[in-house]
Structure formats: structure tokens, C-alpha cells
């Protein structure tokens, strides 16, 4: 039990909630790398990037509640990350998937509107969004122009032969680009509308390096949507921590994403 090991290293007689949270971070995100030296300019970019994820998720109805946002480097490549707690869910609507993509796009958009330029840190985010966009168009039948079709091929039955024409392939690429542009525009408007909160949150991250839900509530006010998870039980220790811990979304180093999965925001990584 990682939490017990951490408590023992700290010479504690029992395991407390901080030990559980640190254990989750270590298992899912890798070892903390506080001695990793990054320039003040890069640290500022990381702070605004992660603040962008947090702001977007805070004001999107279908986004998962924030558990933690950090600009403390972890693992091999992560310079910062956001951690969310999703509810147990098996079916997703178009609106839910788009909100998830907007939350994931929040880091790139925050860099753009703050500095007027973008970095390589959003690579992982863009991979997730692009994969999900193609899944929505070609697998889930969520595009009116392509229609109610699914070209899902888990067994590679099509091999190198696509089950559609070159014209349809061009249409798919076109519709995916439209979807991505719409997501970027929606996210941009959201962050522009909440620019003051973005600035305050980024500055607070630069000051404290790690923020929790209570910190966001202090800066942004209560999230304007009802809680959809057992977040309070997890944080306050009033319930069983195991189910909550297992449900955490944490963009850890080396994590792979199923194209059919809902994307989550997180790691701002080094360019490899």
C-alpha cells in the first residue's frame, strides 16, 4: 500500500488523507521532480496552460470536477498536470464529448490568448482531441454530413482498404477540421469571458504550485453546476476512498488513450 509506505517514511502512526493523495499522485503521475530546473518563462507558460484547463473545466457543464491542478514536475516529461474525478458513465452525448474536448483545449487556448504564441506543451492534448474528433465523425456517427455510419474496425478487417471512397475521406478530414475549429472557438470565448479568473488562477499557481477545489472556489466562486460525483466524500474522508481513487483521471507520463475514450486535460510535457 503506497499510502502506508509514505506515512511510514514520515514517521506517522497512522495513514491520513494527505498520504492517500500523495500516493495517488505518485502511482498515477510518477515521482515528484521538484529539483527539475525550468526557466521562469517556462514555468509561467505551464501555469497559464494548467489554469486554462482548470478554468475551462470549471465553467463547462459536462466537464468532470477538478480534484487538483499542479505545476510541480512529475515523472519523465510532465511539467504540470490537472486531475479530475469523473462519475461512472458508459454512454456519452455529443455535448458531453465536446465539453471534454474544450476542457482539453483549454491549455493551448490559454497560452494563445495570454502570450500571443503557442508552445509544444499541448502535444498530448491535441493528440487526444484529434483522435476523439475522428471517432465522433467516423465511429459514433455524430456528424450530420457524414451521416449515421460507423467505420469502426477493431479487428483490422479492412486492412489497407478503406470502406469508403476518397471523396468521403476528404469529407471526413474536412468535418474533423470544422469540429476542431469550433472547439477552439468555443474554448477561446469561454476563457476570454473569464480572463480575470484565468489571470488570478495562474498567478496563484505560480505562488502555491498546487491548487485544490477549495482554492478554485475561493478565486472563481462555486462551480455553477451541481456536483456529479462523490468528490466531497473523497476529499473529506467521509466515505470509502478506494472507489474514488480508482476513478481518478490523471494524465500521467506514458499514458495511452483509446480514441473512443473521453479526453481529459492534463500534462504539459517536454518536447521529446
Image (tube, rainbow, N blue to C red):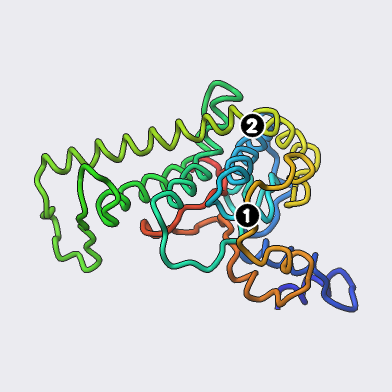
**Residue neighbourhood size for the residue with mark 2, other residues' Cα within 10 Å, grouped as few (<14), some (14–19), many (≥20):** some
Question: Which one is nearer the viewer's eye here, 230 or 12?
Answer: 230
* Percent x, y of residue 46: 63, 37
Residue 107, given in percent of the width and then of the height, sits at: 56, 38
- Dividing the picture into quarters, in which one does residue 240 lie? bottom right
Of the residues under marks 1 and 2, which one precedes in the sequence? 1
Give the label on residue 10, or none.
Answer: none
Residue lying furthest top:
116
**Which residue is found at the position 38% from the left and 37% from the top?**
180
Q: Which residue is mark 2?
A: 194
Q: Which mark is residue 65?
A: 1
How many numbered discs sit on the rendered protein? 2
> Where is residue 54 shown, x and y percent of the image?
63, 44
The one nearer the camera, 41 or 91, is 91
Q: Are marks 1 and 2 in contact (CB under 8 Å)?
A: no
Disc 1 versus disc 2: distance between alpha carbons? 18 Å
**Residue at disc 2, secondary structure:** loop
Give the quadrant of the N terminus.
Answer: bottom right
Q: Residue at x 55, y 49 (%)?
A: 61
222 or 19, which lies in front? 222
Left or right relative to 105: residue 150: left
Query: Which residue is at a point 43% across and 42% down the rendered structure image?
Result: 126
Of helix, strand and loop, which one carries label 1?
loop
Callout 1 crowding tier (Cα within 10 Å): few <14, some 14–19, many ≥20: many
What x and y, as percent, mark residue 257?
43, 58
Amino acid at each position: 500500500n503506497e499510502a502506508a509506505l509514505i506515512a511510514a517514511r514520515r514517521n506517522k502512526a497512522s495513514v491520513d488523507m494527505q498520504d492517500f493523495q500523495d500516493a495517488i499522485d505518485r502511482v498515477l503521475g510518477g515521482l515528484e521532480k521538484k529539483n527539475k530546473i525550468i526557466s521562469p518563462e517556462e514555468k509561467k507558460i505551464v501555469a497559464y496552460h494548467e489554469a486554462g484547463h482548470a478554468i475551462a473545466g470549471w465553467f463547462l457543464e459536462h466537464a468532470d470536477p477538478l480534484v487538483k491542478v499542479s505545476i510541480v514536475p512529475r515523472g519523465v516529461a510532465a511539467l504540470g498536470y490537472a486531475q479530475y474525478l469523473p462519475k461512472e458513465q458508459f454512454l456519452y452525448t455529443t455535448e458531453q464529448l465536446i465539453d471534454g474536448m474544450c476542457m482539453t483545449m483549454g491549455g493551448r487556448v490559454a497560452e494563445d490568448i495570454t502570450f500571443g504564441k503557442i508552445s509544444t506543451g499541448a502535444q498530448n492534448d491535441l493528440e487526444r482531441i484529434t483522435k476523439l474528433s475522428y471517432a465522433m465523425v467516423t465511429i459514433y456517427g455524430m456528424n450530420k454530413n457524414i451521416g449515421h455510419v460507423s467505420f469502426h474496425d477493431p479487428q483490422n478487417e479492412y486492412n489497407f482498404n478503406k470502406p469508403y471512397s476518397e471523396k468521403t475521406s476528404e469529407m471526413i478530414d474536412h468535418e474533423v477540421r470544422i469540429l476542431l475549429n469550433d472547439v477552439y472557438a468555443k474554448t477561446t470565448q469561454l476563457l476570454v469571458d473569464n480572463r480575470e479568473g484565468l489571470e488570478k488562477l495562474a498567478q496563484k499557481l505560480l505562488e502555491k504550485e498546487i491548487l485544490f477545489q477549495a482554492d478554485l472556489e475561493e478565486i472563481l466562486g462555486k462551480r455553477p453546476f451541481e456536483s456529479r460525483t462523490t468528490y466531497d466524500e473523497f476529499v473529506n474522508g467521509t466515505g470509502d476512498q478506494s472507489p474514488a481513487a480508482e476513478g481518478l483521471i490523471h494524465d500521467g507520463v506514458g499514458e495511452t488513450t483509446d480514441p473512443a475514450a473521453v479526453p481529459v486535460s492534463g500534462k504539459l510535457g517536454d518536447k521529446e
